[in-house]
Image: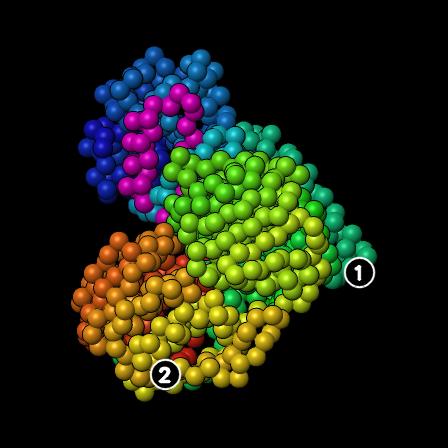
Amino acid sequence: MFNKLCIIGVGLIGGSVARSARLQHLARTIVGYGREQDLQNLQTAQQLGVIDEYFLDIADAVANADGVLIATPVSHIESTLALLKPLWSVDTLYTDVGSTKSNVLSAAKNVFGKVPPNFVAAHPIAGAEQSGVLAAVDDLFVNKRLIITPTEHTDIAALRKLQRFWQALGASVSLMDAAHHDSVLAATSHLPHILAFALVDMLGHQDEQSEIFQYAAGGFKDFTRIASSDPTMWTDICAANKSALLPLLGQLQSQLNKIQQLLIDDNYQQLFTTFSYAKHARQRFLNQIETTMSKSHTFQIQPGGKLFGETRVPGDKSMSHRSIMLGSLADGITHVTGFLEAEDALATLQAFRDMGVDIEGPVDGCVTIHGVGKDGLKAPKNELYLGNSGTSMRLLSGLLAGQPFDSVLTGDKSLSGRPMKRVTDPLSQMGAEIKTTEQGTAPLYITGKAGQLQAIDYVMPIASAQVKSCLLLAGMYAQGETRVTEPAPTRDHTERMLTGFSYPVKREASTASISAAGRLTAMDIDVPSDISSAAFFLVGASIAPGSDVTLRHVGINPTRTGVIDILRLMGANIDVLNPREVGGEPVADLRVRYSPLKGIDIPEELVPLAIDEFPVLFVAAACAEGQTRLSGAEELRVKESDRIQVMADGLQILGVDAQPTPDGMIINGSQIGGGVVDSHGDHRIAMSFSIAGLRANAAITVLDCANVNTSFPEFKDLVKNLGLTLVCTEDQ
Ligand code: S3P
């Protein structure tokens, strides 16, 4: 990538860049530059083989270099750029690794008049408490984030090259403008460092300090680890990012005052709420980091076995989303039990917290929502990040289109590739203003049009419960009666739950209609188990000889039971026991026992009623005798992954004759073999291939399984309890 890479400042970061660039063969020669006082460090760097050569003269150092990386403290960047100015070459890529970015760009402007197009500022979010080249390591940037902060003048080729360079060092690269970078880092890095330094400074000056430190337990050590960092560097960073830090320090002070007051008032209930909110927020952040940093989970499944026993799978995802949405808009307090504590539903919960709704929990599936009323949502301070959840994004787009505030909806890589025009087109017919990318994908920029939406009569071109629900939610804020007609029945949880909340919805044949005349009255919701999660066990027990599983309290809403119908057509032995109605939704226990399956042509009218269950139904088809054919299911191509292609690829790797078609698949049942398959980060694919292990004749490894946490975090434990041998490994 580089012929000669010059590192200015061969310390922990500069040295680690050099070491890993060498390891990855990214530069023919790597040289270092430093000042007289850095001589010893430079000599060490050369002796260690971190750099090939060092120079104390900058002109010699950068002569013929096609890459120059400034790894000095941020306060030295301006003087370094001034030294480089007379030597500047338009053919060289210049970059830095400073922890603050606005000041680095200002430094460049001060020196050059404007930021040169080939100076691309960047910041690797990686480090250690130690400094100097002796602390440099080969893998400092592996699985770490690297933020590039381009300007409008940045040369695209230079930007791409830098991006490739850092990716080759193992970093996950994102782009951001410098001011945004600085405010994000002020909150996530600089403020915690100030806190750690301040706490140790305060405790260190107390009379009884030796005693405090003698008895200091884990909390002190964990919390103050970063107070061992380099004080010069951190003074520099605080000075450089003062403008972002000062308001945050103000907020922190008032938060501490609030906690002080809670203690004075003996308000332990509120203290508990604050702590439990923080605990959940932390978990959410960690999950988010885990997904974005593609810390991969791999499932390894031993072949064979059977499923035996009784279990209750987690709460229904669709209903959990809707319970938060409608509970938030209701007048009064809604108690939810059986709530799905998985990333997708938690993304919706967080979005409503971000819009000012006070939500307690979840604790053991219980959530208490203090409804703010239909017009009580507040403008979120930041974009609403919805992770992997299509339901959150599509339903929220309808709800937010008619609010008196603007909002931005974002999601992870998979969600950002999924089609959103299906909701934004009809919403814009209603007068909504929503900007998507050119491809019709997220981020969605929504301009709130309170009081300006007009009802429409919409015949959906595709059978989608998300589109229907989106339009019904928008219809609650539109003038006139909004009517949505579906080409085939889709899940009707929105209509049922609206009725439960006493909001008028009319349902005639395939049309649902709603208007703005109505209020939601809080209610208690008992969310049944998700039939889409139960489906893995319905198939698992059907294909594995000797299996006998009972799944308790499963939602069997007729718009969701396509999987039972299809499996029964294939010859499965499923008993629906103890059917009952809970909070307006039919529920039952399902007993499923092994039974040899046969291939069928899946009736097209069942497709929307089993839309999420096809990945695991393909596994059932692979175990069936004869041919199974699915058509009319092109929707599967735009789910969390292209479920037709990804399943066909995986099944073929396992030796199954599975031929993808544009709108389905043709599978000839046969022995399932072993192998390594990729779930492409799709939770249902990961779980489906795990279940295939029950009938495989060799071990199956499923890659990229972290997203199982979006719908079914307990999957690994539940399958193990019932008899599948599954080991999950987490690789950094
Ligand atoms: C859902 C509807 C379905 C389904 C998704 C959840 C819902 O999507 O696939 O997992 O909760 O409304 P479509 O409406 O796009 O078919």
Task: Identify the residue at horizontal 65%, vertical 42% (top origin).
Answer: 479
Horizontal placement of 476 versus 310: left or right?
right
Image: 652 above or below 295: below
Residue type at numbered disc 1 = Asp
Queried on whether the Cβ of the residue with tag 2 lies below 8 angstroms from ligand 1, the answer reads no
Amino acid, disc 2: Asn
Residue linked to disc 1: 266
Residue furthest out toward the right: 265
595 drawn magenta: no
Can residue 342 be seen? no
Residue furthest to the bottom in view is: 546
Residue 263 visible, this orientation = yes
Q: Nearer the viewer, residue 471 or 157?
A: 471
Q: Work out whether residue 61 or residue 268 is closer to the camera in this orientation and state it.
A: 268
Viewport quadrant of the N terminus: top left
> What's the CA distance linking mark 1 and mark 2?
58 Å
Residue of label 2: 573
Residue at image location 51% in from the left, 79% down from the top: 588
* Residue at x 46% of width, y 37% of height: 436
Q: Which residues are magenta?
A: 143-170
Element on which disc 1 rests: loop
Q: Residue at x 54, y 76 (%)?
A: 587
